[in-house]
Amino acid sequence: MAALKATARRLRPGGRLWVNVPINSPAPDHIYLFRTPEEAVDAVQAAGFEVSETAFFPDDRAEPGAGAQAKAYDHHGHFR
């Protein structure tokens, strides 16, 4: 969460953020375990971004290792 918040502070107006995270993938090098795509989206929003679009791969979102991607906007509605 701290990294997302720091990114939000450092992006210039109109800057963009693309997030790609593994879902339900408890590998030792993962700092945080997102169990569902919604948890990943919630984390991006809690950092101050507005999510404009999401895509989940593969389509079966319950499958371990599924990734989540989101485009995000800042709290002013600017595309980050």
Image (cartoon, grey):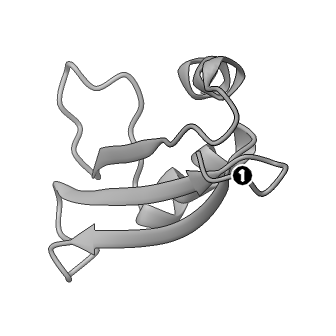
Q: Compared with residue 63, is residue 78 higher up or lower down, i.e. above or below?
A: above
Kind of residue sitting beneath label 1: His
Q: Compared with residue 6, is residue 23 higher up or lower down, i.e. above or below?
A: below
Residue in view at x 19 percent, y 21 percent? 28
Residue 62 appearing in the image: no
Q: Residue furthest right?
A: 76
Residue 8 appearing in the image: yes
| Residue bearing mark 1 | 78
Residue 63 position within the rendered picture, expressed as x and y whole percent measured from the top left:
18, 69
Residue in view at x 17 percent, y 59 percent? 64
Foreground residue among 7 and 29: 7
Q: How crowded is mark 1: few (under 14 residues within 10 Å), some or many (20 or more)?
A: some
Residue 67, image quadrant: bottom left
Foreground residue among 24 and 14: 14
Quadrant housing the N terminus: top right
Residue in view at x 16 percent, y 54 percent? 65
**In-image side of 48 versus 19 (left or right):** right
Residue 58 position within the rendered picture, expressed as x and y whole percent measured from the top left:
15, 74
**In-image side of 12 versus 48 (left or right):** left
**In-image side of 24 versus 7 (left or right):** left
Residue in view at x 48 percent, y 41 percent? 17
Residue 21 position within the rendered picture, expressed as x and y whole percent measured from the top left:
31, 45
Question: Disc 1 on helix, strand or loop?
Answer: loop
Residue 69 position within the rendered picture, expressed as x and y whole percent measured from the top left:
35, 58
Quadrant housing the C terminus: top right
